[in-house]
Amino acid sequence: MNKYIEQFRDSLKAEHDASPHTLKAYAEDLKEFSAFTEKKPQDIDNLDIRGFLASLHHRKLKKSSISRKLATIRSFFKYLHKEGYVKKNPAKLVSSPKIPKSLPRFLTIDETFALMEAPKGDTFQATRDKAILELLYSSGLRVSELTMLNINDFDIKESLIRVKGKGKKERIIPIGSKAMEAIKNYLSERISLKKKSQALFLNNRGGRLTQRSIRRILIKYARMIALKGSLSPHVLRHTFATHLLHGGADLRSIQELLGHSSLSTTQKYTHVDISHLMEVYDKAHPMAKRSN
């Protein structure tokens, strides 16, 4: 089985430009499945796959995790079938577990303002952290996109930024005045490091900030303002999109700004907006709390 897994990984890297993180996740899922079945791909049927999923369920894995592993197995057997290693794809006969839809978490306006004001002072670290927070909220960037930004990706005069998204697709995003001001302040402090790196956000040693470091920065300031609930770069991305929708932006525009390939991915924010409207209605309409 391992040789097929390696060939599948090579195919994902060559044909789909999959990230190292994606390749590692696929390989781990398939090796776990291989250890469970102890069979050659040619001998595996849909009952083996169902048995594997059942074992995951008994281990109390989340339905989303089980669904992801099944998607990996489907892609694997699709590849094997295309290459002629197996006669059919047994995973086609296995249905995915139904995953309850959850609304994306986002911050209120007051929470957002408190977070943006949390970094204090004009030190390198404080100005950098404020620029990171302001940019995430102003642009809705993915954390991977943020860490890959270079100084020359900014058009400071036009307040625009060039972003390399999923699949290396580029998009141009406007940056708000608050975020631009924060970035300019950070760049003036960044000079003190005297590093030639083109990376926009640097650590204290002059290296490019990692995604893990960005998450730690957000957790630090979330604790500082006693924010309820968890805070991640994705929460700020959801906050960006939700606040735009509340402000009257249309879904197509939000789709472009977020870099979603499909409008259906963006449409989850309509559910957030409806929830927001119902909450406002319940609080404000005189007839909303009428007893039956």
Image (cartoon, rainbow, N blue to C red):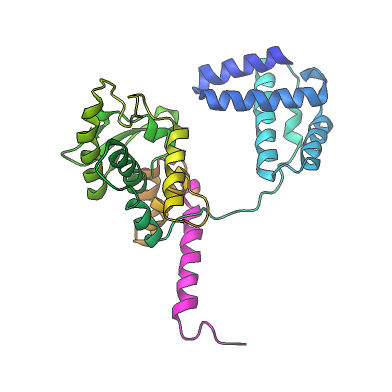
* Figure check: 142 above or below 17: below
Residue range corresponding to the magenta coloring? 265-292
> 159 or 172, which is in the foreground?
159
> Is 285 in the magenta?
yes
> 160 or 206, which is in the foreground?
206
> 199 or 195, which is in the foreground?
195
- The quadrant the N terminus occupies is top right
* Figure check: 145 above or below 278: above
Give left or right: position of 243 versus 62.
left
The residue positioned farthest toward the top in the image shown = 3
Residue at image position (83%, 34%) is: 51
Place residue 82 in its image quadrant.
top right
- Give how far across and how far down residue 29 sits, in percent: 68, 28
Give left or right: position of 177 versus 33.
left
Residue 105 seen from this side:
yes
> 221 or 148, which is in the foreground?
221
Place residue 143 in its image quadrant.
top left
- Give how far across and how far down residue 262 sits, in percent: 47, 43
Give left or right: position of 131 versus 91.
left
* Figure check: 184 above or below 279: above
Residue at image position (42%, 37%) is: 214
| Magenta stretch, overall SS | helix
Residue at image position (49%, 22%) is: 17
* Figure check: 100 above or below 46: below
Residue at image position (50%, 25%) is: 19
